[in-house]
Image (cartoon, rainbow, N blue to C red):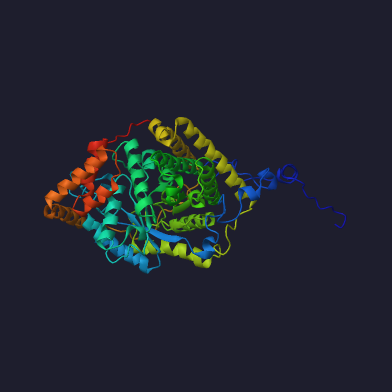
Amino acid sequence: MSGTKIRRSVNEAEWHESTYRSQKERKDKFLSISFRPQPPVVTAESLGEFDPTDKLGFPGEYPFTRGVQPSMYRGRHWTMRQFAGFGSPEDTNRRFKYLLEHGQTGLSTAFDMPSLMGYDPDHHKSRGEVGREGVSMATIDDMERLFSGIDQSVVTTSMTINCSATVALAMYFAVAKRRGIPFDKIGGTIQNDMLKEFIAQKEWICPPKPSVKLVCDVIEFCAKEAPKFNPVSISGYHIREAGATAVQELAFTLADGLAYVDHCIERGMPVDSFAPRLSFFFDVHNDFFEEIAKFRAARRIWATLMKERYGAKSEKSMMLRTHAQTAGVSLTAQQPVNNVARVALQALAAVLGGVQSLHTNSMDETLSLPTEEAAKVALRTQQIIAEESGVTNVIDPLGGSYYVEKLTNDIEREAMEYIHKIDEYGGMLRAVEAGYPQKEIAEASYQFQLRVERKEEILVGVNKYEDEDEQQIPILHVDYEAEKNQVERTKEFKERRDKTKWKQALESIRKACTEGRNVMEPLISGVEVGVTLGEVSDIYREVFGAYKDPGML
């Protein structure tokens, strides 16, 4: 044995040919969940002319690959949010307080389908849906009840609502005004991202062009009056949930953001006056390293585009700040307890990717809205990562990993190819009108489903490791009495308001719409005197027109 020479490969190609070639692999192909080929090993050679000074830098410095804050989680943990909303405002208010008592650090509000689509509870189209998948919200009194006993100047609130976002935000600000809280003291985020609605989620009132105008009304208003509030959460989450790959999610989300920047600049707004408050919202799916690299690539792309395309001078304009949510589409109704493990891995990827805010899904969300116990387990998952795992002690601990850096570079390059394609359309608004991102997502979704059916993509408990006798878990039941009460409450509210002031407010809102002015000030004044969410939405339908899906797929 003393005469045996230990062989060492000198490069990746030689290792592959001499040492690895004879090895048996358990699959013909190794692909990420986004169909990305996975090499057996990644070395420094794979990075080519990679300059860490240029591509990585340091946390809190351009291009922000390693994080937007210098101290990241050594300074403070991310904001821990749990999506909550069901039944009446009182029902959801109790859930808010329960989560805050158990360590949640920010609120995240889910609205019911009538609210999301711009209908009051007493509208015939709302029947059977009031309070079912989120909280019912039609009047300023509903908003007051929702945040009863919660200080808007202390707790930050996220609101997941889009085509009727202007009205919901007007109500939130009007409640603060009632309480004597200045708008510049209010922190939070409203989703308000209509482009992704046309791409993926399909909840709209008006056609794309006026919808984008309303989004930018909120951005303009908040830039002047509520500088701590994020006026839009540019959302890749729903794009990914619709079946997009990681690269499509990233590219289409950033392209949506660029469209809003373009429209605000066309209004005469300097980029540094509003860009620092643009926020993002991404999905966190099952492919652990791909998700980490996606967040890192997102920050680098956004910083580069803001600096080079728009000439932003403020570093805050170049910082991509993001909320993330674990992948609802990855949860399974089969063996739902397995979802706890999925959520934990996804949450860890989000933290290693450097998010500023995180929502962890509950194990029961494929079956119902979350129970209190399931929501607490999801919150505890974040707290265990924060307090017990040790991953928050070092900033960007995977920085410099050959694999992670190569993935980051690849995702950046591929996302930019999509963005350049969208530029050729004339921007995301025209690309959406042409159906381009919709078609790309539909094809990716189809290909993924084929992989599942062929068992090339394994879903534990669904197409492998199935159980005949599955464990049953408790689920939340929303009492239909909540709908009846909300309908009656809304009717009573409309009866007791001052009809003269109400009619004047409606006309003021309608005039702002027809003249192309910012709607936010008349909306805040209007909801104060009793204008409802559904009534404003009807004005939008009247002035801007009602949108119907053209079915371009």
Q: Is residue 25 left or right of residue 105?
A: right
Please indicate, yes or no, whether residue 304 appears anywhere in the rendered image: yes
Total count of labels = 0
Residue at 43% in and 36% down = 428
- Residue 337 versus residue 285: which sits nearer the camera? 285
Please indicate, yes or no, whether residue 133 appears anywhere in the rendered image: no
From the top left corner, tell me how far across and down residue 109 is, in percent.
33, 56
- Which quarter of the figure has residue 66? bottom right
From the top left corner, tell me how far across and down residue 44 is, in percent.
69, 48
Residue at 18% in and 52% down = 530
From the top left corner, tell me how far across and down residue 440 is, in percent.
45, 35
The C terminus lies in quadrant = top left
- Residue 173 versus residue 489: which sits nearer the camera? 173
Whether residue 38 is situated above or below residue 141 in the rendered picture: above
Residue at 51% in and 34% down = 420
Q: Is residue 20 left or right of residue 385?
A: right
The outermost residue toward the right is 3
- Which quarter of the figure has residue 1? bottom right
- Residue 312 versus residue 284: which sits nearer the camera? 312
From the top left corner, tell me how far across and down residue 192 is, in percent.
35, 47
The outermost residue toward the bottom is 101
- Which quarter of the figure has residue 472? bottom left
Residue at 12% in and 49% down = 500
